[in-house]
Amino acid sequence: MEQGNLTEFKSSPEIREKLFEYGIAKTFSEGEIILNENAYIKVIPIVISGSIRVMRTDDDCREILLYYIKAGESCIMSFLGGMHHDTSKVKAIAEEETEILFIPVDKVSLLIKEYPEWLDYIFRLYHKRFEELLEVVNAVAFKKMDERLLNFINKKCELTKSHTLYVTHENLANELGTARVVISRLLKQMEETGLVKLGRNKITLV
């Protein structure tokens, strides 16, 4: 694999060379599970292309979306779990066909010692993920479900660079941590007010 493929990762040529020297690249299909909850973390992922959605599951097997990992980014939860030899507290799923460079945990420590910009990269990721998690907490605690749903659709469209989402009501419910009937009712209301146009497993922003 050519190092130039990691275009979104803002770093010096030296550290990119080390990443590809240490890392193992793998491609995942849409919907494929990359990391399960409670699995031990032995490698740190850096997304080369595509995107990953990170989910959290409660004791009743209900899921909620925490954040997306885009090209050039990594999962700070994997960093923390891997460095402390802990298990994963989240589930990572390929949002689309996604290519990932996996860096062994022991090499991550070496990179931190040798390249200060690598540590800066980790801190920037931590800051971004912390803000996104605060947004999730704020949405769950203070926003109504219709507002959360519309924000989610907008964010998903922005991620896919499209005005149309191909997704089931069940999947939307799972990612927002609610019931399918609630999502279906709210989408119908949005269609009646002209915010969206609905099709079979398809939602288009108007």
Image (cartoon, helix red, strand yellow):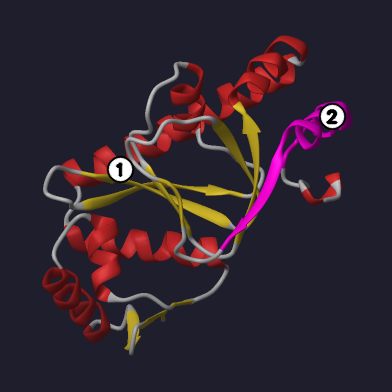
Residue 44 placement (x, y as % from top left): 57, 33
Residue 116's disc number: none
Q: Position of residue 100 (x, y in %)?
A: 63, 48
Which residue is farthest bottom?
199
- Residue at 20%, 45% (x, y): give it: 140
Q: Is residue 15 magenta?
A: yes
**Mark 1 residue type:** Val
Q: Nearer the viewer, residue 127 or 47?
A: 47
Q: Is residue 53 visible?
A: yes
Lateral position of residue 99 relative to residue 154, left or right? right
Where is residue 172, by image quadrant?
bottom left
x and y percentages locating residue 190 in the rendered image: 25, 77
Q: Which residues are magenta?
A: 9-28
Is 202 on the left or on the right of 120, as rendered? left
Does dot 2 land on a helix, a strand or a loop? loop
* Residue type marked 2: Ser
Query: Which residue is at the front of the view, 128 or 112?
Result: 112
Q: Residues within 10 Å of mark 2 (few under 14, many from 20)?
A: few
Location of the C terminus by quadrant is bottom left
Q: Which residue is mark 2?
A: 12
The disc at residue 136 is: 1
Q: Assess whether mark 2 and mark 1 are in contact (beta carbons under 8 angstroms).
A: no
Q: Nearer the viewer, residue 62 or 165?
A: 62
Asked where in the image residue 21 lies, by quadrant, the reply is: top right
Q: Is residue 115 above or below residue 96?
A: above
Magenta run includes residue 60: no
Label 1 or label 2, whichever lies nearer to me, is 2
Relative to residue 7, is residue 170 depicted above or below? below
Ranked by sequence position, the earlier of labels 1 and 2 is 2
What residue lies at 22% left-to-right and 86% top-to-bottom? 192
| Mark 1 crowdedness (10 Å alpha carbons): few <14, some 14-19, many ≥20 | some
